[in-house]
Amino acid sequence: MKMSEIQLLLKASFEKELLNHQKRHVVFWYDAEGEFLEDIKELVLEGVCIWMLTENNLFATKYELETVDPGSHFLLYANMEKPAPREDWLLSILKMGSEFQTDRVTIMMRELGITDDTLRPVFKKYTRFFNNRTRYSAFTSYKTNRYTEEMIDLTVLAALVKSPFNTLDDIIRTLFKLHGDEMHIAWNIIEKYGDIETFWLLAERYYGYSLKEKSLSSLLNHFVLTYLSEQVSFIDFPDSWQQYVSNKPTNAIIYIDSWMNHRTDQSIFNERMDELSEVLNVNASIEEWEIEKVAEADTFRAFDENVIHYLQKQLISGANQFDSYEELIKKRRRLHWYPEYQHDYEAIEYARCLSKFAHEKNRHIPEQPANELFQLYENDYFQADLYYRKFYTAYDRVKNKERLSALQTIVEDLYTNWFLQELSVKWTSSLERQQHQGWPLKEIEQQSNFYRTYVQPYVSGGERLFVVVSDALRFEVAKELIDTLNHERKASTTLKAIQSVVPSYTDLGMAALLPHNKIRYEGQDVFVDGIRATGIANRKKILNRSVEETFALTYQDFIVRSRSELRQLLVGKKLIYIYHNEIDARGDHAATEMGVFEAVDDTMNDIRLIINQLVNAVSASTIMITADHGFIYQRDQLEKRDKIPKEVDDARISTRRFILSDQEVNVDSTLTYSMDYILESDQQLYATVPKGADRFQVQGAGANYVHGGAMLQEIVVPVITFKNDRSKHSGNDLRKVEVKLTNPVRKITGIITYLEFFQTEKVEGKRRPNRLLAYFVNEEGQRISNENIIIADSPSGDPRDRTYREKFVFRTMRYNRKARYYLILQEEEKTPHSIYDKIPFSIDITISENGSDKHSD
């Protein structure tokens, strides 16, 4: 340090305010090395007497300060070691004065604003660390309210390992991120510039880690197995694991909980758990444990794989404990590895739903009149198609499909060999009994009357209407779609089923949805009142004949337009048809038909986007969504017995699911209907369709996705009516269900505490599920507990099904009974305004020396 800098520091010392009845400043400067012995002779401090103190003038110095000059400021410079208090003749004067020091530790402490001399040994311990300016800068970059011995130890360690924060949790997590040589280098740096012994003392103090043979790998075992022992407390660990389980578990539990839920370090946690699972041979132990006892364990992915194996095995065995399977899946949703296995669980859930559906029906569909069977499909049987589709939507996204291959076989058997076959037989039988009546069924609303029944009333009333026609949007898809719309938009949404035309294919179905007086065929083409019904331009012409202010466009043309372009395009239009084609476009080609269920999801997203654009861009009030036909899809390859030889030579149109001919044909295992129900009276055509879900034999691939026949999946067509609600308050208001803490006492008295939460209403209609994170913080916002996930999505009317009991583990630390702590309920999205509730608590826990808690009276 330069003398000029010292002079400024000394000047500042003498200019300080006099405290505690001081009358003057007396500053002692011990310079044992004599670094400034020559400089002191040149030093001038205005108003200060500079006195050279030696071992031979102690009495004279005391006499000078106390008798000769008791009022002046003095700087006492001594070229000697500071004497011990018992040997210091001037101790009483030193106590009333102060000491000026120029060693590196003192200067550093002064720069840090530290006046507590008891911390000097701590800083001296880290002399090598602070000798480097870069390390010193790293040390000062950490925010610290008050330096203590422990905080200095932690901050040095944090700077050495480049931890983002100077907490032991973050320091150790940073070390666990490293591998191989990186870990070795970091450990060497701690040994060279830090203090390894201090590191292990902190690990013991915080986490109860006290193994004789210490290493980072055994510390990781300590954390993980302590956490796991709390999750599976009723299970006896292997002997080799027992030594790692802490008798002070809470901080270790919270450490693992925070690491596994850490946004950026979660992937590192997963890697380390996979490595440790191999080392500990976790799979061998888990296989011996009862599934009920590990239902909520999530330390290793092996738990999820074991649960998945168990659920699949149960469904295959026909144990039929469907509610318990559902409960187990719900428990897994809240746990760490669920995102990795979400698609596996979803596939199992829909396999469970399909199995339960079959079980409740006793694998039997009774004989009924066709119109009643139609309505049963509308209200109930559609679920089998939905479950089958949802199973494959999830299954196709599973990484390890081999794991669920046995379950896929069961699903195929249930759907194809039971449901589709049984429905085919009963539906065909019902159609045959009334075949003399022809097509369509009586007492069922008809697709051919769509315009007259659904559109005309809006046109006549002068109300603007949008009609979205989505090719092959079958009824079960519409069921899922309206549930989604009801949960995400302030609107009323209704769904009705109508009976499509037969043959149920695009050209005829699209024509039936347009205003028409006469429909006829010219060759293979369908004409509406003399205009060919295919293509947007022709459909515009047909619509314009009924309503001048009409418009028609494709989804592709619609979606590329900005809001202002849409407003300009549709200004003054009263009736707008939007044509969407994703399901049929993908399903009708052999190369892409396997992706038809993915196309269904894309279609639902597209329709939601259409609605959003129409509501926001052109203030649409009423939007109808319908389809030209449905479809049948089976994943497994069809057997030869599922295909009917086709022996018609002069057919106008011939596909796998229908034959359109001028003459009535006679083919085994088929139904034939006259087309006079929809065509002009002077044109006689016949539609012949296979009974049930069979296909006509056609050369080439692509038989799994079909339409055109008379199966319920093909001819039950949805009509969704969406009415946007712009009122400020109505029954269509959207909101998430409320979640309330039910415990009346707002006081924590145990290091492990259970709290109960209540979902105040069931999920239905406009009441949406609510997903919350629950954890405790102190007044500074620092977390002091583990984190729980509350998934409030119960549709049950029974309050017991809407009660959630959550376990909170608190850090082992000192708690102030008079301080405020908070239970935070946070929406899972974690937006800046995502705090759902902040509930004040007091904490009355006394931590004993061994780390256990006891209630303070």
Image: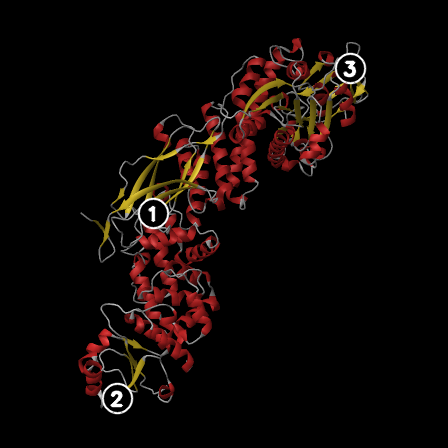
Q: Which mark is residue 54?
A: 2
Can you say whether 184 is above or below 661 in the image? below
Secondary element at image label 1:
helix
Q: Earlier in the sequence, mark 1 or mark 2?
A: 2
Q: Earlier in the sequence, mark 3 or mark 2?
A: 2
Q: Position of residue 578 (x, y in %)?
A: 69, 27
Q: Which residue is mark 3?
A: 663
Identify the amino acid type marked 2. Thr
Q: Is residue 19 left or right of residue 284?
A: left
Q: CA distance from mark 1 to mark 2?
A: 69 Å
Seen from the viewer's position, the closer of residues 523 and 445 is: 445
- For label 2, the crowd category at 10 Å Cα-Cα, with few meaning under 14, some 14 to 19 and many 20 or more, is few
- For label 3, the crowd category at 10 Å Cα-Cα, with few meaning under 14, some 14 to 19 and many 20 or more, is few
Can you say whether 792 is above or below 663 in the image? below
**Quadrant of the image occupied by residue 44:** bottom left
Q: Which residue is mark 1?
A: 231
